Structures are given as structure tokens and as C-alpha cells.
Image (cartoon, rainbow, N blue to C red):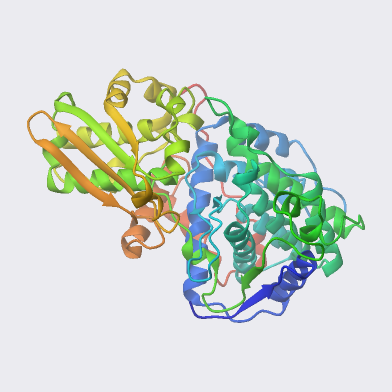
Amino acid sequence: MNGSKRLLSATSNQAAGLGEYCRDFLFNPQSVSTATFELVERFHLDSVGCAISAIHHRANACTVLRREALQTLPAAQHSGGICFGDQKLVETARSVAANVAAVREWDSNGTNFGFDKDAGRTAGEFGHNDFYPVAIAASREAGFDGNEALRMMLLIDEIRGRLAEVFPLRMYAIDHVHHGAVASAAAFTAALGGTVSQIESAIGLVVSHYVPFRAIRAGSQLSDSKGSSAAFAAETAVLAAHRAIDGFQGPQDIFRNPLAIYRLNKPCPDGMGPFDLELGESGDAFAIHSMHFKLGLYEHQSASAIQSFIDLLGTTPEAVASLDSIRSVTITIYEPAFSIIADPAKRNPQTRQSADHSLPYIVAKTIQKAASSYAGGNTRCGWSEVMLLPEDYSNAAIADEKVRRIIEKIHIVHGGPDYDSLYPEGIPTSVSIDHDQLGALNGGRCVFPLGHAKSDQSATVSLVEEKFERLVTGAVRSPQAVCEHLRLRDTPAAHVANLYAFPIILRPEHQ
């Protein structure tokens, strides 16, 4: 990629280095490519589409947090924040929690796998483009215009994306949102004019007091805590930023602190941290270019299974003419997907949070939608026809006996080193079907499904736009008008301050 980077050495105080980097990135900026800012816009729009839909459907966690936020008033010393779909000024950290919860509720926004092969930084930590509401809240308080807000979004994505390349939180049972909390605390403090010392304090507060563990994902059925982890991480980041600016002094040099999560889990000599951290400054030298879009509601590690199945239908669409004719479906996949989304407990999902992390359910529902499309006379089945949407995860959909019968036919096997070696650069998966009339059918091994950063970008863009419209239809009066409203490039600060205040139509309760 073209552009300059800044190296924060493991032998340096990286928390202070992040402070200097954030201040320079926001207030002494180098030129960022148009393509990079267009990608930020696209990820942001996609995330807001997810949020609008979740609020419209009255999804529980974001509804609770939004209701809680709307009962607060902004602190006297801060300008306050705005929740999606409302014009009322509320306490900033609560608004951020509510908005991030809505963005994350469907688990359908952008994804990163923390992998930079060229730089040799391949820790492979997961992460998501969850934290744009932090950038909008900071922009509101700082009086940023649209271009500055986009730069703020890019800053958060760059820090959390690069941390994901060098420190695998999951290896230590820590939830991936922690990288986003560090990034949000640093960027928010900088946006409000914080000094390098204050930014260092905010980072230190987040790392020493607010580390989320993967206990939120334990158990056979997942709860609201899984989807809201990013919301609480963002909320604590904003609280830490405000406290640091107000004078609270957090621990210094936290990345080299022997009792903080970094050196504690990856011991190294005094004066050293466990990793170098390299951050983009200009051009298109940014981690966002390796981040991926989801083309519906599903755990991203299942995307290649969907793509392989679509490819199978491309040559043999009649495979779904009769689901009773399908004897078995075999999915061959890599680690860690085999252990996470193919966990035997995932064969019997009871909640939406479990179903959208269940490879058997995701593939079974995709097969069912493809069969419905074929029965309707459509012999060409692609992502548009099988796009998984909120209604595919309703209680009735999850309990559907027809889907359960398909799940019983699904067998998942680990592909071994031939598959594992291709991850996390790709997400290699193949789907094959044993069919009564058609015999053995195979979709082939897919490594870069549509939506992946290395897939066909023009096709991906088209599907992301379709996904936005399908998610927000019925939730706003005009999807096109909201889409245009959400564009940030070259917009004034007044527009950014009220960006999320457009009305959202709530679905009738108990529908």
C-alpha cells in the first residue's frame, strides 16, 4: 500500500506514543487517499443500517440501553450526545453505549481478522467496526465537520486494527472489544484537545480497570452480553477520556506495565513491551483496507460456506428443488472456525445470539431460502436471494422444524493443515451435497467470499448497498434519503452534530 506509517517501538512508552500519534493525525494531518475515506464512509453506512434495523425491531439489549440513555441529561461541562432516532441531548457516554449496542446487535457490521502478511504481523485477533458512534459523539463535542469526523473514524479503526495484528486477546480469554476500547479512549481524548499525558491516562484507565473477558461468550447459549460488549467498552472509553481531561491521572506506560494484560500474558524483559505497533499516517496505508463486510446476518467465519453453497447452485440449481432429496451436507472448514461456530452446542441454538454463531443453523437457513427462491421460479440463486436478515433469526425461524431437519443432515469436518494454513488471510471452506438424484455435488473450496477484502469489490459494494436498503426499509420513511443524509464528506459541523437524530419507526410491540 502507498503511504507513510509511524512505528511505536516495543522499547518505547507506546501509550504516550499513541497520544502523539492521535494528536498529529487529527490536528496536523497528512493526506489520506480518497479511496480510504470512501471505504470509511461505506463501513459507517453499513453499521448505521444495522443499528436502524435493530432499533426498529426492538432488539432487547439496544432497546434497554437506549431507554436508559434517554432518561439522562448531559453533564454540565459536556455538550451531550444523541441517540439514534432521537433529538434529545443526553449524557454522552450513555448515548455512545446505546448507539454502539444498536450497531452491534445484529452482528452484521464490518469485521477484521488482524492479519498483515507483508508486515509479518499476524496475531489474527478478531474485531468489528463497532465504534463509529464514539467518533460522532467526539465530533459533536469537539465541533468537527464531516471530513474531521471521517478522520476520527479512521483513527479508531487504525488503532484497533493494528492492535489486532500484534496482540491476540482471545488467547488470554479477553474479549476482542478491548482493542476498540483502547482506540476509542485515545481518539476521544485527543479529539477533545487532550494532552499527550491525558491521552496516556485515559488509555491507562481503560487497560487497568475495564478489561472484558470472554466469559460473556461462555455457555451453550449466548445472551445480550455478547452483543453489548462493544457498547460497554465504548462507554468506559468515553468515561475514561472525560475523567482524564478533567484531571484524573491514570497509570502511565501501560503497555510496558508488568501487571497489565500485555506483559502479564506475554512476559518480556523490563523496558520492553510485547510488540511493536505500526500505524498508518497517509495515503492508503491503513488497516481498514484489510477489513471485511458481512452480506447479511451471520458470523463472518461462515461466509465462505455460504459462498461455496452459492457456487454449487451456480452449476446445479436443481439441487434444492426438493430438500428431501438431499441426503447429507458436508462442510469442511478451518480452525478456529471449527471450534467456534461448529461447536456441537451450536447444533441446537435457542437464542438469536447463538443462531447467528451457529454454522449448522446459518447453512441450513441459507439452504431453505435457496429452496424457496427456486420454488418461486428463480433458477439463479446468489447472495441477494439467500441474504440472511433479522426475520431469519426470529424465535419462530429458529424453532422451525424444517430448518432443524436440514441441520440433522449437516456434517462438519476439520479440513486440517490444508485449510488452516490459509487462515486468517482467507476463510477457506467447502460445501458438498450428497443428493438422491444428482449424486455428489461440490461447491469447491472458497477462500475469499464476497464481502472479504480480497474479493470482487464492485460486487461487494453493490450487495452492501442492497443490504442497507433491505435492513432499513420499514424502519425509516425513505431509505434513500437516510442514505444521503448519512454521507459525511464535506458536510458542516452542524450536520455532524445531528447526524443520528433522524426519526426511526419502531415496529409494533409483540409483532
Q: Is residue 2 left or right of residue 159?
A: left
x, y percentage for residue 100?
A: 62, 46
x, y percentage for residue 270?
A: 82, 62
Q: Looking at the image, which residue is at 67% across and 74% down?
A: 7
Number of numbered discs overlaid on the protein picture: 0
x, y percentage for residue 27?
A: 72, 76
Q: Quadrant of residue 356?
A: top left
Q: Is residue 87 left or right of residue 407?
A: right
Residue 61 seen from this side: no
Q: Is residue 315 left or right of residue 449?
A: left
In the foreground, 411 or 66: 411
Q: Looking at the image, which residue is at 50% across and 42% down?
A: 107
* Residue 491 versus residue 301 in the image, above or below: below
In the foreground, 55 or 211: 211
Q: Quadrant of residue 228?
A: top right
In the foreground, 508 or 298: 298
Q: Is residue 442 left or right of residue 349?
A: left
* Residue 373 versus residue 409 in the image, above or below: below
x, y percentage for residue 445?
A: 27, 50
Residue furthest front in the image: 269
Residue 379 seen from this side: yes
